Image: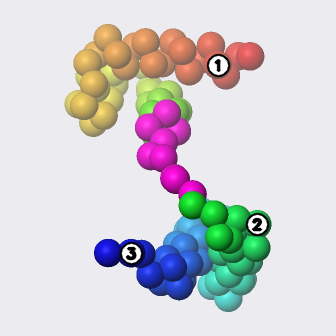
Amino acid sequence: MGVDVAELIRDMADKVAMRCTQEVQLQDEAAKQVGEIVSNLIIEEWGGQNIYVPISLASKRAKRNAMILEEFTGDNVSELARKYNLSVQAVYRIIKKERERCMQ
């Protein structure tokens, strides 16, 4: 059972457009153009190659850790621990590491 490549490329273009609209506040038409440009670039640069796309746990963790520091108010560690399904100690470690990273 193979992947329908045309469907995959359309889906990628749609998802890029959606992210551009949500995260960069591009207008719908401009976002669609960016989605098409990105998907065409991938085809042009890597077409014909087998590409494995790993799940980036490190990236997700880094985003989560940045959010924890951003949401930290000084007295909400227990709340953050519950929200992110972590121990209180883990939240304190994350806050310390994120502050150190920001100072570099």
Q: Is residue 80 visible?
A: yes
- The secondary element bearing badge 2 is classed as helix
Magenta span has 46? no
Taking 19 as reference, is 104 above or below it? above
Query: What residue sits 30% from the left and 34% below the top?
Result: 84
Q: Which mark is residue 2?
A: 3
The answer to which quarter of the image holds residue 29 is bottom right
**Residues at circles 3 and 2 in contact by the CB criterion of under 8 Å:** no
**Residues at circles 1 and 3 in contact by the CB criterion of under 8 Å:** no
Taking 66 as reference, is 92 above or below it? above
Query: What residue sits 40% from the left and 13% below the top?
Result: 92
Magenta span has 52? yes
Q: Which mark is residue 101?
A: 1
Kindly identify the amino acid type of the residue bearing the numbered disc 3. Answer: Gly
* Left or right: 101, with 56 as reference point: right
Cα distance between the residues tagged 3 and 2: 22 Å
Looking at marks 1 and 2 on the same chain, the residue that comes earlier in the sequence is marked by: 2
Front residue (pair 81, 46): 46
**Image coordinates for residue 80, horizontal then vertical, percent:** 32, 29
The residue that label 2 is drawn on is 45
Cα distance between the residues tagged 1 and 3: 43 Å
Q: Which residues are magenta?
A: 51-59
Front residue (pair 38, 83): 38
Looking at marks 3 and 2 on the same chain, the residue that comes earlier in the sequence is marked by: 3
Kindly identify the amino acid type of the residue bearing the numbered disc 1. Answer: Arg
The answer to which quarter of the image holds residue 73 is top left
